[in-house]
Each structure stands twice: as C-alpha cells, then as structure tokens.
Amino acid sequence: MESRRDVPLKMTKPPVTSDPKAAGAPSRRERVREATLGEIKGIARRHLVEHGVTGVSLRAVAREMGMTAPGLYRYVSGIDALLVAITADMFDELAEAVASADASAPPEDTELRLHRALRALRAWAITHPAEFSVMFGPRSRLDPDADITPALEAGSRFGSTFFALFERLLQEKDIPFPAEEEIDPELRVELNSFADTVGLAVHDVPVGAALVLTTCWVRVYGVVCMEVFQHLDFVMRDMEPLFESELQNMMTGLGVRYRPVEEGEGTSTRTAG
C-alpha cells in the first residue's frame, strides 16, 4: 500500500462561462424567451414528479402553457431535449445544495466540509426521489442518439465539489491506497477512464486513489439509492442511522475523524417524506 501527500490542491472546475457584461445585456426578446423556456421546463419537471418520466409529453406541457405542441419546438427540439434540459437543471440544483453545505463549514476544515456535503446529497435525494431516479437511473426513455451533453456537463459540476474535497484529503491525510501493480489490469483501464472523464488524471491522481474514491462513492451512493427507492422499507423504517453508520465506517477507513450531525446543522431528514 502507498499514500501520496504531494497531490496538488487543484480541482476539476466547472466550465468557466463568459462574463455576461462583456457579451452585453440580453435583449427583451431573449429575456422573454428564457422566461418562457423556464416555464416550460418547470411544468415538465412537475409532470415528471407527479407522473414519472413517461408522463412527460410535449402535448401535455403545451396544453398547460396555452400553446400548441408544434409551438414548443421554438423552444425545445423535442421531448428528448426537454428531458435532458430539466435533468441538467436538476443536477445544477443538487450541485448548489452540495456546494452550499460545503461552504457552510470553515474552508480549512476539509473533514467537516466532506461530511456536510455528503449529508446534503442524501437530504436532497430523499426529498426529490422522482428527480433522483431520472438523474441517476437508466436513460431508457431517451433515444440512444439523443444529445445528453448538457446533463453530463451538469453532472460533472455536481461531482466537482466531491472531487475537490477528495483531492484536499489526499493532500492533508496519509490515505492508504493500493499501488498500481496491485490492481487488476482490466480494472485499471476502467479507473483510468474514470479519472480522465472527471479530470483527476490531469492532476496526476494515482489510479489507486481513484479506486478509493470510486469505492467510497459506491458505498455512499448505494445507501442513498436503497433509501430513495425504498428497498429496505420492509425491514427498516428509518435509514438515517444506517447512512451515518456507513459514513462513519467509510471515514474511519480513510483515516478521517467522523463528525456526528451537529445540533442545528440542518441535515437531519428523519421527518422527510
């Protein structure tokens, strides 16, 4: 096993957007168009929550908008584009919730920041189960050739907070991870692909560290999914103690001090749903 303390304190940043002032203020027509598109996406998301992804249709959205279905094509190219657009919005909303929780802790307290960010993920997920299932579930409703780039980019922005915190932990802690030669070659290929996709590779994060990050995500994500999709309802009424237990075990394995939920932290969700 080896540890690495010279990992640079860098981060996979969301794409930097241009300064809106440099591009000039949007015209009245552009503002009206954006407002209309926002209303369309809001209705589509509500239909998704109420009826599931199969219950979202251009015809139903157009009817509620007081438009014809062909009229919607001035704003979205089709149902796939609309679903991708609202999925991107949901990822951005989740990213904001996670980033806000991260920012609520002192910048130098990486351990507390990570705890709060992970709890924010769970809190958002279990209070938005329909959205979560679309964001992280199979894309069976979409055409295989649909352009999902906006959703993928928004998903990367969501993950960026966790990648940044993990990189900080690598810098601050002697986190053990397997040497490259200890990892199955086929798994190394997949881990290198993962590192390239999320931007870890450009910061020289070792493949063993990528394995640790992936394993931690599987553990946290697995417990959250079990709760969101109610897979343990027949044996467990309250999943929060299990989540906290898994979080504690994971943190301990990383050599990170577990931080219980603080009074007034606002992350407890025992009354949710």
Image (tube, grey):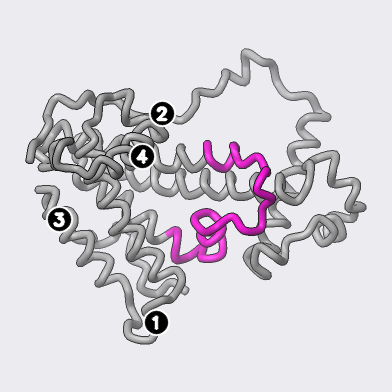
Residues rendered magenta in the picture:
124-153
From the image, tell me which residue sits under label 1: 233
Q: Residue at x 27, y 39 (%)?
A: 188
Q: CA distance from mark 2 to mark 4?
A: 9 Å
Q: CA distance from mark 3 to mark 1?
A: 27 Å
Mark 3 Cα shell of 10 Å, populated few (<14), some (14-19), many (≥20)? some
**Image quarter (top left, top right, bottom left or bottom right) of the N terminus:** top left
Q: Nearer the viewer, mark 2 or mark 3?
A: 2
Q: Is residue 248 left or right of residue 210?
A: left
Residue 197 on the magenta span = no
Q: Is residue 118 left or right of residue 126?
A: left
From the image, tell me which residue sits under label 2: 13
What amino acid does circle 2 point to? Answer: Lys
Foreground residue, 208 or 61?
208
Relative to 150, residue 82 above or below: below
User: Could you tell me if the residues under marks 2 and 4 are in contact, i.e. CB atoms within 8 Å?
Assistant: no
Q: CA distance from mark 2 to mark 3?
A: 27 Å
Relative to 24, residue 273 above or below: below
What amino acid does circle 4 point to? Answer: Thr
| Label 2 vs 4, first from the N-terminus | 2
Q: Position of residue 165 (x, y in %)?
A: 27, 38
What amino acid does circle 1 point to? Answer: Asp
